[in-house]
Amino acid sequence: MRRAIAHAKNGDWPTSKAMDGVTLDYDARHRRRYRLRTNGGEDVLLDLAEAVAMADGDGLRLDDNHWLSVQAGQENLIEITADNFEHLTRIAWHLGNRHLPAAISADRILIRPDHVIESMVIGLDGSIHPVTEPFQPEYGAYHEHRHSPSSSTS
């Protein structure tokens, strides 16, 4: 079984050398050692020195110097919207106060389904809608692996 031994951020690896890809949900994109199945059906061992938070477009270098592209998989999410930006900002503050992973853009917030949080958002006069799309939440303020917020919107 081939091993994925190095990670590179989107833009920092030779995408033309990608021989295959892996489609992973949010949880599977934060790993150190894990058995992956490529989109082409090959089993690959993710074997990194430390856990890495991968994002859509990142690359994994294999032990034979080939590359795999990382793609964020589709997930069932909740889209939160509000009447205006100020209202959405207040909802974002309440979500942040609960330390939830959230993908934030100017006109919506994406979170994982959680009936308690959904009730809170409705109580704050926000709107919720189920959606299915890739999930790339914001990283914490002290996290070293940064990606642009635009990667969290469609």
Image (tube, helix red, strand yellow):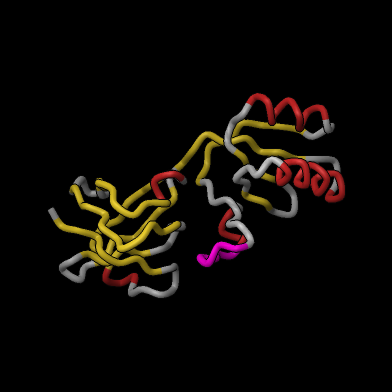
* 48 relative position to 143: left or right: left
- Visible in this render: residue 39? no
* 30 relative position to 108: left or right: left
Q: Which x, y percent locates residue 22? A: 32, 52
Q: Which x, y percent locates residue 151? A: 56, 59
Q: Nearer the viewer, residue 4 or 97?
A: 97
Residue at position x 76%, y 32% in the image: 121
Q: Which x, y percent locates residue 150? A: 61, 60
* 152 relative position to 17: left or right: right
- Check the image and report above or below for 112 versus 39: above
Residue at position x 23%, y 62% in the image: 19
Based on the displayed image, in which of its 4 quarters is residue 3 positioned?
Answer: bottom left
First to last magenta residue range: 142-148
Q: Which x, y percent locates residue 93? A: 78, 47
- Check the image and report above or below for 106 versus 88: below
Q: Nearer the viewer, residue 42 or 144?
A: 144
Residue at position x 83%, y 33% in the image: 124
